[in-house]
Image (cartoon, helix red, strand yellow):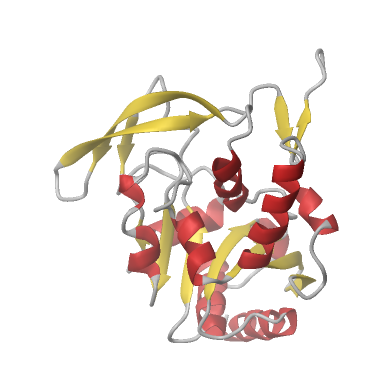
Amino acid sequence: MDSAIEQIKMDLRKLGLPKNNNLLVHSSLRSLGDVPGGAETVVRGLLEALGPDGTLLFPALSYRDVGIEHPVFDLRNTPCCVGALPEYFRKRPGTIRSIHPTHSVSGVGKNAEWLLGDHFKDTTPCGPRSPFRRLRELGGWILFIGCGISPNTSMHAVEELVEPFYLFTSPVDYRILLPDGGETRMRVRRHNFSGWTQMYARLDALMDGEHLRKGKILAADCYLMDVRDMWEKALVALKNNPLYFVKEIEKGA
């Protein structure tokens, strides 16, 4: 287990992850291979690579379980729907989770409270107080472990600034259950994408090798993306062509 943690740290150094930085991770645990200690080893490797003043974030999205038919989000117990590693991290002691019915984020570290603490004030999934938008303000990196760069939730925050026609549908009134037994309500505009496929891998053609780095962590093919450069390049592309990051689904396909 210790050797695997050390190898993860070394691999992240080769990718160029700066110490004491902010890191949002999209991941496939299976892609890393047979890891002694499993998810805990991976999380410890990430934390040790970041250092004592770093901040580690994982998406804790719950849109598959929380929606029109079941508009109830339990901050402590609603699982995330984006993989085994984010779900493990969400439940790990010391981790905090932002309050949002469909697009919450889990985090730990120096800046976690500021990045996550006001998400409940937004009326969209990735609004101005969301961790996705605040990560741009603070600066940091997005790490993709074995999943390519397509599952990039931060791109929804970019889209929310431009509001292409495919993005939003009607709002939903959600009931939010809090760990202390209390509850609150949130009215949130839902994302739509009906009839459209997300094409966020097109960022690869927009970003250079300094801001989108490619390498290995254990057995996984990985990408390390500079958040601010992603925002800069993506916003220009989206303003020039609102359909740049989507593809229409052919009828009958």
Question: Residue pushed farthest front?
Answer: 240
Could you say where residue 139 lies in the image, as x and y percent from the top left? 54, 71
Give left or right: position of 64 versus 66: right
Residue 197 lies in quadrant: top right
Considering the image in quadrants, where does the N terminus appear?
bottom right
Question: At x 42% / y 64%, what residue is drawn?
Answer: 107
Above or below residue 97? Residue 244 is above
Instruction: Report the residue at 77% width, 71% height from top.
Output: 213
Residue at 58% across, 36% down: 163
View extreme (top): residue? 252
Q: Position of residue 90 (x, y in %)?
A: 41, 57
Vertical position of residue 140 compared to residue 186: above or below: below
Q: Residue at x 74, y 41 (%)?
A: 245
**Residue 4 makes an appearance in the image:** yes
Report whether 233 appears left or right of 189: right
Q: Is residue 33 shown to the viewer in this render?
A: no
In the depicted view, which residue is nearer to us: 65 or 24?
A: 24
Front residue of this view, candidates 236 and 212: 236
On the image, the x and y values in percent for residue 4 come to 63, 80
Specify the quadrant of the image occupied by residue 221. Answer: bottom right
Q: Quadrant of residue 170?
A: top left
| Quadrant where the C terminus is found in the figure | top right
Count the marks.
0
Q: Position of residue 164 (x, y in %)?
A: 63, 33
